[in-house]
Amino acid sequence: MFLALIQKQIKLLLRSPSELLILLVMPIGLIFILSYALGPLMEGDTEISKVEIALVQHGNQEEQVEAFIQMAKDFFPITDELKGQITGMLPVKLLEEQIMENEELKEFVHITKVSESKIDETRNEKEFSAIIEIPENFTFDFLSYQFLNGEKPSFSVYLNEGEQITASIVQTIIDDFQHQYTLNKVLSENGLLSQGMIVPTPEISSTIKTIQSQGEITSKIYYTFSMAVMFILFIAGTIASQSFLEKDTHIFDRILLARIHPITYLSSIIVSTVILAMLQTMILFTFAYFIFDITFNHFDLYLLLTFLLAMVIGGIAAVLSSLNYRYNSASASNVFSNALVAILALLGGSFFNISSLSPGMAKIGMWTPNGAALDGYLKLAQQVSLSDLLPNITNLAILLIALIVLAFLLFPKRGGLE
Amino acid sequence: MIEVVNLTKAYKKGTAVDHINFYIEPGEIVGLLGPNGAGKSTTIAMLSTLIPPTDGDVLLQQKSVLKDPSSLRKVLGVVPQEIALYGDLTAKENLNFFGNLYKMPKTQLKNRVEVVLQQIGLEQESKKLVKHYSGGMKRRLNIGVALLHEPQYLIMDEPTVGIDPQSRNHILETVKKLNEHSNTAIIYTSHYMEEVEYLCDRIYIMDQGRIIASGTKEEIKAILSSENTIVVKVENYSNDFMNDLLKQPFLSNINSSEGEVAFTVAKGMNFLPTLFSLCEHHRVLLKSFQVEEPTLEDVFLHLTGRALRN
Ligand SMILES: Nc1ncnc2c1ncn2[C@@H]1O[C@H](COP(=O)(O)OP(=O)(O)OP(=O)(O)O)[C@@H](O)[C@H]1O
Ligand SMILES: [Mg+2]
């Protein structure tokens, strides 16, 4: 009997071409359009594919070198060769070279030199993933530390906390730079320093490789998941309006007369929605796998996340059905499909990564079912483990429980027949 | 036996059903006749426990079913006034779906589906989507779904509304056979008095939420036994003639259309001299003259002063 209710629901959906068009053809079309038309835009300047670093240097490097040489003259003779070495290992220049002259890094990272006067402005803008601020006498102090055992100088790095991936890339670069710089110091102390050894490229490239294998979010990946989580929402509206049609055409009368309890009926709506939502996502993912070469490592985690999302969609379908039955009109499901889906999609980041606008936005997004799932899928695309998914799982579970409770509370006695 | 006692449904806009009483015994066909808005569907919805009455009770074997609708629902089949079917499923799929809701065992369901398809004459078209059916075929399937679980009582709410005469006859025959062969008790709702007259043993006439007459066909028609309905056909019909006719005290319920005038007169009343002299006076030519048996329509007209259908 329960099975019959579910079979019926699945048959009805599979037999309505206009619904299938919205549920399957539209998302596939949009993934194509968005990843090819908007893709380059996205890859050009967003935090996901390119790390923007601002470099702020206080003081003039050449003047500091000059000042150092003037001072050092009193301690040891400055030959032309040493002068060359000194100018060759200026730290800021070293950092710039490390990034800009490395083929692999160049694709990832872009450095913008920002003048001192604009530093506050830069800090308030969100377009940079990191700001490296070199203090006034850094070069001078650095040279003193190298040659005269002075204080170890330091510089500041500001990371944009909203962007974990890029922040970790920057961190790696800085660590690497520090490693270099200590190495230089060791080498120079042992008198082994020579110009050819300053930039040992192999170590840098090996670091970058590990970053790349962590999974890069391409626009194809982004839009595959963002469209999947957006269009899964439509299933809830579709099922709820189909269920209202059952009341409207008096089929629900027949269901009651067959002694089916309204709770059983509502449960069948939830279960069939879960099945259909899973089916839709599987079809979209299979498509993405073959056409867009998107890989799904950790298939079990993808399945878990999809199942949870599908359950929440089932909960939404049930709430909408209850509202439709209660108010004896399909307006709840209509408003959902025609307006609410778009709002949820926006907040959840289906159109663009809205969470990068502010941490508050990111928080709101995580409380939309689609936003929580999208965030989870993107994490999975970067090879995380179950524990990284915990916030997503928690939010979805809370949403699920709230929706189910609400649905059963709202469903009117006798289905609202009067 | 199912009984309704003082059954009442009050809505904000007015009382749809107003303290009605009726009963149906096993094996009977009972007609519920009434014009649009009389409260027939509301009565049926309360009777089948789908909506709660404002007042009154529904009894099955003298026991109220309002608290425990299950006992009644088990023995009840309802054919709703609306086509309550899935257009995107075939006839067979619809039957299987509703049969499954009744938890019928697989083989039994299979048999019943075959039998029902035969009863409603849709064996050939059982694999067509219902949305591609004609109105008459949909009506027949709408009935078939209610027959699957072999209900003891079948309630049919205007099962022939808006269909062609052939389908209509088929449905009337199906209902008759069902009653004769399976001894199913049937409450047949309609605003077609011919159907009710043809099918029903007993009849309730409903208007504006109340039952205004009840009994066998003969008993109800006996309400008019003191009157005859006369239909005359005339030529040169004029309004003056009509006005003079209306002034006659012994004629009532005068209805006229071009060339045809119908009225009732008390039995044994010799009205012919008056009619002839009126015709002569207005130079109206009398073409034919007929005394008719009263119909349920006439009874309704007599009781309410309005026609059953307009
Ligand atoms: N849910 C409701 N709320 C308010 N009024 C209602 C409701 N249902 C029915 N009515 C009113 O009750 C009256 C009786 O309606 P009902 O449908 O029972 O008549 P009916 O005899 O079945 O008519 P028809 O031949 O048109 O089917 C009508 O005036 C209708 O407007
Ligand atoms: Mg009705």
Image: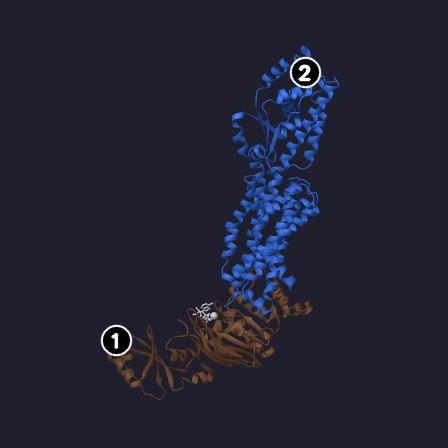
**The C terminus of chain B lies in which quarter of the figure?**
bottom left
Q: Quick one: SS at disc 2?
A: helix
Task: Give whichever of A396, A346 is nearer the camera.
Answer: A396
Chain B's colour? brown
| Amino acid type shown at disc 2 | Gln
Q: Chain of mark 2?
A: A
Disc 2 crowd, CA 10 A, few/some/many (<14, 14-19, 20+): some
Residue A85 is marked as: 2
- Which x, y percent locates residue B143? 56, 69
Q: For residue B61, what is the image quadrant?
A: bottom right
Q: Quick one: SS at disc 1?
A: helix
**The N terminus of chain B lies in which quarter of the figure?**
bottom right
Chain A's colour? blue
Circle 1 residue: B240
Task: Give whichever of A311, B271 is nearer the camera.
Answer: A311
**A198 displayed left or right of B160:** right
